[in-house]
Amino acid sequence: MTRSTPSGWSMPSSLSTRLSIVFAVLLLACCGVSAWLQMAGSDRHEQEVTQRLSIGLAAHIAGNAELMKRDGLNPSAVHELFDQLMAVNPSVEVYLLDAEGRIVGQAAPPGHLKHDRVDLGPVKRLLAGAALPILGDDPRGGLEGQDVSGAQGVQPSQGGRKVFSAAPLKVDGRDAGYVYVVLSGEDREALVANLGAGTVLRTTLWSMAWVALLGLIAGLVAFRLITRPLRQLTDAVQRFERDGVAAIDPATPAFAQVARGDDEIATLGKAFQKMTLRIAEQWRELTALDQQRRELFANISHDLRTPLTSLHGYLETLLMKADTLALADRRRYLEIALGQSRKVGRLAQELFELARLESGVVKPDKESFALADLVQDVFQKFELAAEARRQRLVPQIASGLPVVTADLGMIERVLTNLLDNAIRHTPEGGEIVVQLRPAEAGEDGVAGVQVEISDTGPGIPKELQPVLFTRPAFSSSGGRSGGLGLMIVRRILQLHGSEIRLLPQPGKGAVFAFQLS
């Protein structure tokens, strides 16, 4: 896959490919710079060696007494000596300079001398012992920005500067000028250019090519190994994007493999591994919630259909037989219809209350109160119902209980729902016990109260226990059922940071427990 830029050029989208291209470009640039530095360093080394070997040549020439006469330069001796020197060593060019740098003696072929003066700055630095190599003007070379007339003050370009040897020339003890020897003359430069330039260039280019090739191969292999975990991670993510949740389980081992190590890619792999596990967990939770919602609708429909069918039947009977029914029958039918209507109303109210709790709109209005007093108040509401069924309400309240901080109305609803369930599912003559005892302090160091509500009824069937607090359910054996009341209890306690639990206690019916602090 490629990505088009505004200019129309396509850039590979693979990170490994882009890294390889960038590495290749940088490697070639570094090889080019290295080759240029190597050649420049080699030239400078050669210049320094040449200058050090011939540093005394000019002084030797200046010691020849035949070069100067008492009244000035001896032209014949100069030409003879210069011709001999350049015949023995064609690479040197010898010049005599006056005190201002003008050339007053030389043996150049006609037309080869391009300039009639030499800058004396490098000469003075050489005579002062400055670091070598020192480059000076080449009278036969080109000067940048200077015409052939040799106007003063115009300096030669770097291409016209070469290593040289120089020595002061004295006549009768006074300075008469300088002997100036260019150590790499035009004959040597021409010979080097013809014989050596191609060889050096080819050697340098081949060396650079081999270094670049080997470096590129090594870099590509390294990039391949380094980016392999990233490619595995990319494949796993793409598979997850393509196949959705079905790819979570196959993708997790890939993330685990990438997560080995301590580098940035391993850290990224660990993060993606945690993300996939979290997504899988959330997906299972959503699937379970969706199933619970479906079952909730089905059970609520069942709860509504039964009393509504009964209500409709009795009302229809009253309408059809209003003239033939006795007064007592009509009254009994109306009482039954009214009871079924109350069931529908209570179910609708519970459903509305559960929806409000689940929506997050309702927030606990917490206050501190004594839970024992609240239990006594709730007992008073159920005294008549318990007496009618010859049941006993037994409070077991430990002394020294701490106060709790909670929403008084919500906790009263929790106790009401649990006691109502216990009374309805406990046979006549049974017993309902509410036990309050101190609970161990939590992580925040705050002590609490443990609440247990038990009865002597048939208990909760095993098939209902896993879903008792998540959806309304009915036992297939016709035993005790769980409705919206327990779901409301669970949600209220969750808003208080607590959980309702069903405790297995042999010899008792259903035992519900929760804790408040």
Image (tube, rainbow, N blue to C red):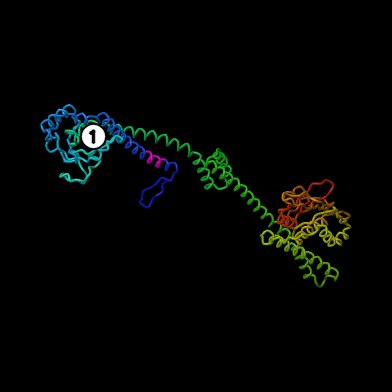
Camera-nearest residue between 389 and 496: 496
Q: Compared with residue 2, is residue 472 higher up or lower down, i.e. above or below?
A: below
Q: Let me know if residue 189 appears in the view.
A: no
**Amino acid type assigned to the residue bearing label 1 in the image:** Phe
Query: In the figure, 222 relative to 478: above or below?
Result: above
Q: Is residue 438 left or right of residue 218?
A: right
User: Going by the picture, which residue comes out furthest to the left?
Assistant: 76
Give x and y (percent) for residue 436: 82, 53
**Is there any visible trace of residue 452 in the rendered image?**
yes
Q: Out of 35 and 255, give the one closest to the viewer.
A: 35
Query: Is residue 25 on the magenta stretch?
Result: yes
- Outermost residue on the front side: it is 173
**Residue identified by numbered label 1:** 164
The outermost residue toward the bottom is: 323
Q: How many marks?
A: 1
Secondary structure under the numbered disc 1 in the rendered image = strand
Residue positioned 86% across, 55% down in the render: 395
Residue 442 placed where, x, y %? 74, 49
Percent of width and height locating residue 405 = 75, 58
Q: Main secondary structure of the magenta part?
A: helix
Tell me where residue 43 sits by quadrant.
top left
Does residue 50 show up magenta in the picture? no
- Quarter of the image with the C terminus is bottom right
Of residues 214 and 100, the one drawn nearer to the viewer in this rendering: 100
Callout 1 crowding tier (Cα within 10 Å): few <14, some 14–19, many ≥20: many
Residue extent of the magenta highlight:
20-27
Relative to residue 18, is residue 253 drawn left or right? right
Image coordinates of residue 293 in percent, x first then y, are 67, 55
Q: Nearer the viewer, residue 161 or 436?
A: 161
Q: In the rendered view, tell whether residue 33 sits above or below residue 434.
A: above
